[in-house]
Amino acid sequence: DIQMTQSPSTLSASLGDRVTITCRASQSVSTWLAWYQQKPGKAPKLLIYQASSLESGVPSYFSGSGSGTEFTLTISSLQPDDFATYYCQQYITYPWTFGQGTKVEIK
Amino acid sequence: VQLVQSGAEVKKPGESLKISCKGSGYSFSNHWIGWVRQMPGKGLEWMGIVYPDDSETKYNPTFQGQVTMSADTSTNTAYLQWSSLKTSDTAMYYCARQPVDDSGYWLGLDNWGQGTLVTVSS
């Protein structure tokens, strides 16, 4: 299985901060990578697919980049609604796999 | 687009269970449905996907033989079932739509159900 490793596991940030989350794959996934946001008690929400394509309705201050084995999710200016856990997922090789998650907390 | 899952379940070890995910607002038959497990306090695990039109499935080996995914296009409903539950099956289970673009490339899981909490305890 392709292992997806996110860093950091927890991130403390303030409103307005620029936040970057990294996702590394154990082998190349090209750009077959998605990012999700999950709030406590809620279903995940798709933010980014194909590594850098913004899902419809997602604020433009979210962005994704990368290819191969290293990817980043960037929140350019952290908003109150963005405190949540973020997951990356590869979907190039079965079984598709998620990273362990990055929790973004209030500093 | 909406996916509505069946309600929470409390079962005993060894019992069987079938949970559902009803789609609306889109062509259910022509979109894959994925299932994702989230154990208490843990991350997301991809279980597999099912294509309602022909019931083709792709399972995560971790779950192969442990669960069965199916779909009924007459009721626009996907199912996840267990024949003999274990306490380790206690988790939240999500269904989500897994679209494919016009070129046949996968996109992300773009619409999610609200989740079904399954509790297995003696």
Image (cartoon, rainbow, N blue to C red):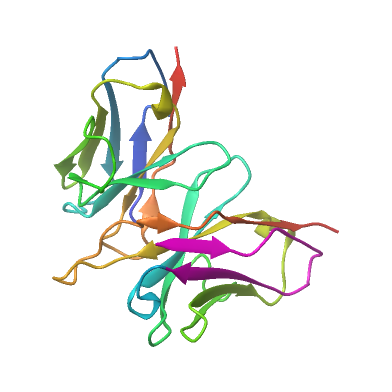
The x, y position of residue A55, in whole percent, is 26, 48
The x, y position of residue B80, in whole percent, is 57, 72
Up-down relation of residue A24 to residue A27 (above or below): above
The x, y position of residue B60, in whole percent, is 45, 67
Determine which quarter of the picture holds residue B66.
Answer: bottom right
Decide whether the magenta segment is chiefly helix, strand or loop: strand
The residue segment tinted magenta is B1-24
Up-down relation of residue A80 to residue B122 (above or below): above
Determine which quarter of the picture holds residue A1.
Answer: bottom left
* Residue in the foreground of this view, choosing between B39 and B101: B101
Q: Is residue B60 visible?
A: no
Position of A48 with respect to B27 (left or right) is left
Determine which quarter of the picture holds residue B30.
Answer: bottom left
Position of A81 with respect to A93 (left or right) is right
Q: Quadrant of the C terminus of chain A?
A: top left
| Numbered disc total | 0
